Image (spheres, grey):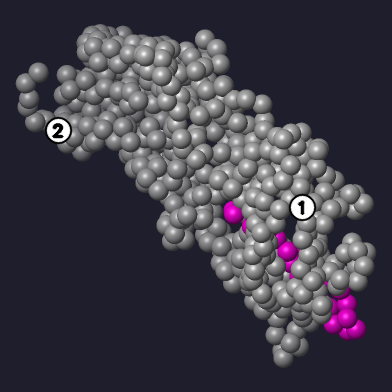
Amino acid sequence: MFPSCYSKTTKGANANTSVTKVVVGVFVVYVLHTCWVLYGFIYTKPCDSNRGDSCISPFVAENSQLSIFSTLDPSDVQGHKLLHQENEFHILTKFERKLNVSLPEAARSNGPLFAVIYVHSGKGPPWEDSQHVSYVTRLTSQTTHYPPKTTTSLNGHTAQDTDELPQPAPGSVPTAPVSHWHSRLSLSIMAEFSFSKGGVPSDVRRYLKVVEEGKKKMYLPLMVVDELQIRMRDFIEINESTAEVHLTVNYENISLRKFRLRSHLRDVIYSLKQFGFTEHQVDEIKGVITDTNGYVLAFTIFAAILNLLFEFLAIKNDFSFWRKKTTMAGMSKRSVLWRCFSTLVIFLHLLGDQKGWLLLIPTGVGVVLELWKLKRAFSIQDDKFEELERVTSGYDSQGMRFLSYLLCPLCVSGVTYSFLYVKNKSWYSWFISSLVTGVYALGFLSGFPQLYVNYKLKSVEHLQSSIYMYKGMSTFLNDILSTILTVPSHPLACFRDDVIFLLHLYQRRLYPVRKTRGREYGVSCRQRLKGKPHED
């Protein structure tokens, strides 16, 4: 029925196997390196002076004070305004203070406001103390404000979403950035670990400030603000009429392990913002880290890394499959066209919403691959199998016609609802938002024409099983991640892909592939096992 093939393994197949082994090997090395780095966070070898090690011990001055200042410019000490001072400050204590802060006029007009925190001896201004420790953090931030979701009924009444932090509706129009006050400040200090002179971790060394007391080398307390506790639920919108706001200051002494972890997470959050993540998206990530069990979080990270591996292997095998394809016998061109269209719509939607490069780059690579596959699908022609390709095209057209009976009413109703009840920036925004909503909801049906072709031909020998295996594993991991995490809408579309994957597995069971089949893509072998008979 399909083109014959050699039972010998080709050189191309050997090359692909070698590439897969290299990729899996790199992945294993990366996982082992990550485990080693995490172990370094958990355990740091302390200094043992009894063995003759040269130690760097913590320095804690007597009668220390903790002072918190607000300022518009951290480098201008003359503009520092005292917010709070702990005259009898003990590093090992734990406390909470509630403050009332008067906002300067510049901060009310979308200007930045910072907090400068000092730990010093208490003799004179803190910045004049040679052994002071300081830390700068923001008290305000500019966040793009989205109007709450609204639904207008036919009688003209408007219902507004009353969630504490409403999420932007698809196509909703953001207003200008608005200043928000951070009502919580979680401060921590680490000063209870002795480092060996050559054993200071690289991520700690940049924060270490060493002083000498006689022949001893000592480091000043290490201070850090817990960025994970700065959540959007604690943000207060401020404007020109906001004269005073409240601030809750929490302090605790932490271990070296927690200090390293919080410092690292602060750098990660900064990197995410540089990649284009919004405050809403960063806040969701903070919620995942703080509200998820540690073991579940570790499993989630491992599943996400494994998902990237399967995604890469699926793309690699998909590229190889279509590059060596010589006939479209048994293949649905309309499935390729539909998937290309869906990927392009999702990319335009993400681009219009100004998503971060972390989402745009992989989606853009997917668009390029799908466009290339589409070009290959419509350019491949083999005169030897012209009759079989004609039969396949007929079944493909028939399957797409059946699918249109379901899609057309759903798409028309969705577009009409979006036009009447959802606020959009422009006609283009309305058009793209309507398309992407249909893709998220019904995109999984892109595989239906191929399933229908398989059904009519009673064969799956023209498909490559490894692509479906990798995509199936990736879909399964996406299901797990979507269940555990609060993610944007486009990864949630993975749940419906399970339906197509399970139907494909059922067809492979119904129409078994001959065991003597060669390894070349898009081909079958001399004899075909009889599948389970069924009526059309």
Q: Nearer the viewer, mark 1 or mark 2?
A: 1
Which of these two is toward me, 21 or 69? 69
As displayed, is residue 101 above or below residue 197? above
Amino acid at dot 1: Ala
The residue identified by callout 2 is: 510
Locate residue 121, reporting x and y percent: 86, 72
Residue at left 61%, top 61%?
A: 261
The residue identified by callout 1 is: 115
Residue sitting at the far bottom: 50
Does residue 340 appear to the left or right of 258 in the view shown?
left
Amino acid at dot 2: Leu
Does residue 149 appear to the left or right of 181 in the view shown?
left
Q: Is residue 230 a member of the stretch shown in magenta?
A: no
Which of these two is toward me, 318 or 288? 288
Does residue 260 appear to the left or right of 233 in the view shown?
right
Does residue 63 appear to the left or right of 166 in the view shown?
right
